[in-house]
Image (cartoon, helix red, strand yellow):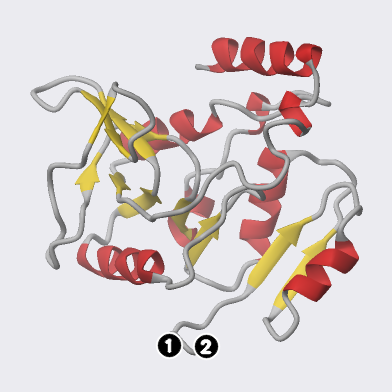
Amino acid sequence: TKHGLSVEVLINDDSASEVHEWGEALAGVPHYVVVQGNVHEIRGYNRLAMMSRAELVAVIQDDDLPPAVPDWLRQARDLQQEHPRLGLIAGMVGQIQGGPDTGRWGKARGRHVRQIPYSDSKGRPFMFVSWANIGPFLLRRSIFLASGMFHQSFSCRGDPGIGFDYEYGIRLWRRKYEVGLTIMQFRYHQGSSRSSGTRASVSAKQRRDAIEKRNT
C-alpha cells in the first residue's frame, strides 16, 4: 500500500445485507466479504481470524473508524517485535487491578479514565494492563489460535457478545502472555450505532445491559 503496509480486509456481513456496499467501499483493496448466517460477533471474529493469512490481526467493529494514517498499525508491529509474548494490543481503554497503577487507563471517556503514563521505545503511549475493552483489538494470530480464541459462551443464541474482551485478556496473562494498551486515535460510534443493533430499542438496550452485568 502507499503506507508501506500489506493489508487484507475480511468482513463479517452476518446478515448478508451490505455485501454490495462493502465491495464498493473497498474497491482496489484486497478483501473478502464473508456471509456466515448470523453466527454473531464472537464467532465471526474467531472464524475470520482462522481465515486470515496475517500474524497481526486487527479486530475492528463496524462503527469504529480508523485514522487515515495507519500509525497505530506501525506501532503494533513494532511492539510485537519488541515483546514476543505480547498477544493482545488494545486501542481504547484498559484496566489494572492491584498495585500502584490500579485504575482505568487510555482514551478519555469520562473522569474515571486516566492518560497512559508510560511510553514504548519510540516515545509513543504504551503500557501493560490486566484486561482491556475491544475497539479495536490487535491480535498476534498464532497466540490467539493457540490460546483458544474468544470464548463463545459469552454470546448465547440471538444475544450480543459482551465481556468476552475482558475474559480474553485475563486468560492471556494466565497462559503467561501479555496484554498491552496504546492510543490508536479511532473515531467511535460512527453511523447509526447509537440507535441500531443492541441499542435499537428500550428492550434491546435492557437486554444488552443485563448481559454485560452477567458477563463482567
Q: Secondary structure at mark 1?
A: loop
Nearest the camera: 63 or 96?
Answer: 63
Picture coordinates of residue 134 (x, y %)?
49, 40
**Which residue lies at the image location 21% right of the left edge and 53% below the top edge?**
125
Question: Is residue 17 found left or right of 199 in the rendered image?
Answer: right
Task: Give the image location of residue 157, x and y in percent.
Answer: 82, 26
x 77%, y 33%: residue: 196
Residue 1: image tag = 2
On the picture, is 207 further left or further right than 187?
A: right
Percent position of residue 169, x then y: 40, 36
In this rendering, the answer to whether 112 lies above or below 150 is above
Residue labelled with disc 1: 4
Look at the picture and state if 189 lies above or below 211. Answer: below
Q: For the residue marked with disc 1, what is the amino acid?
A: Gly
Residue drawn where x is 48% and y is 70% of the image: 68
How far apart are the two marked residues, 1 and 2, measured between alpha carbons?
5 Å
The residue lying furthest to the left in this view is 100
Quarter occupied by residue 133: top left
Q: Amino acid at mark 2?
A: Thr
For residue 50, which numbered disc appears in the image?
Answer: none
Dot 1 alpha-carbon crowd within 10 angstroms: few under 14, some 14 to 19, many 20 or more: few
State the residue in front, 37 or 195.
Answer: 195
Residue 46 versus residue 48 in the image, above or below: above
Q: Say whether residue 109 is left or right of residue 97.
A: right
The quadrant where residue 84 appears: bottom left
Q: Assign a secondary structure to mark 2.
A: loop
**Residues at marks 1 and 2 touching, judged by CB atoms closer than 8 Å:** yes
